[in-house]
Image (spheres, helix red, strand yellow):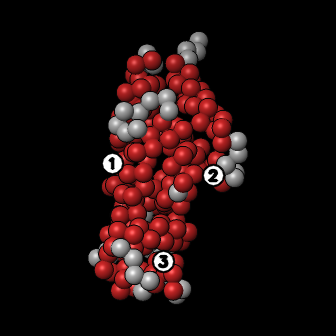
Amino acid sequence: MSTEATRRLPRAQRREQILAAATSAFARSGFAATSLDDVAAEAGVTRMVVYTHFESKTALYRAALDRMRSRLHTATGAPDYDRFSVAGLLAAATADPAGFRLLFHHAAREPEFRAEVDRMRAVSYQVTHRHLAPGIPDPAWADWACHLVPGVVHEAVIAWLDAGQPDPDTAAARITRVINGIEAAARATFR
């Protein structure tokens, strides 16, 4: 461990250091395969230091998820989402790609955190419903679109991160076009 990592930090700073390390470790290996020793090594501290901030691996994982959710809420203007929310989502993902992947990709695969992911999906559905459903005449297709859009947007952001964040100035507009395409498909009538 480096002197920099082990020097005494204010409690809040140390907690943030551990959360950042845990987010990276969990996003890389998943909950089950990541030990507190792995997190401690990534943070450059001892396991006991981790335990002084988090009572368990579960509490640490939950705190990492909460940290990213809080960042997303701030970046997207929650709960008053608007046309700038996709840009905020991209900004939050750019600032913390591991946290974004942890929240929208890995946590859904962890049975212990499934209920939290389901609650988050329900909120995403409600937000999408509030914005899209009024413009879609058929309630069944409105329901379809409102379930589809959040997952597609999250996967679009992850794919954008994986592609090396191409053309960040137009990424939000491109993802918005995907949303508009889903909305148009839901509104379409076929004879």
Task: Give the mark nearest the N terminus, 3 or 1.
Answer: 3
Give the Cα distance between marks 3 and 2: 24 Å
Q: Residue 108, how many percent across, how many down?
A: 44, 57
Q: Secondary structure at mark 2?
A: helix
- Judged by depth in the image, the label closer to the viewer, 3 or 2, is 3
Give the Cα distance between marks 3 and 1: 30 Å
Give the Cα distance between marks 1 and 2: 25 Å
- Asked whether, in this view, residue 21 is left or right of residue 80, the answer is right
Residue at image mark 3: 43
Q: Are marks 3 and 1 in contact (CB under 8 Å)?
A: no
Query: Label 3 sits on what residue type?
Result: Ala
Q: Secondary structure at mark 1?
A: helix
Query: Label 1 sits on what residue type?
Result: Arg
Residue at image mark 2: 161
Q: Residue drawn 50% across and 54% down?
A: 100
Q: Residue drawn 66% across and 54% down?
A: 162
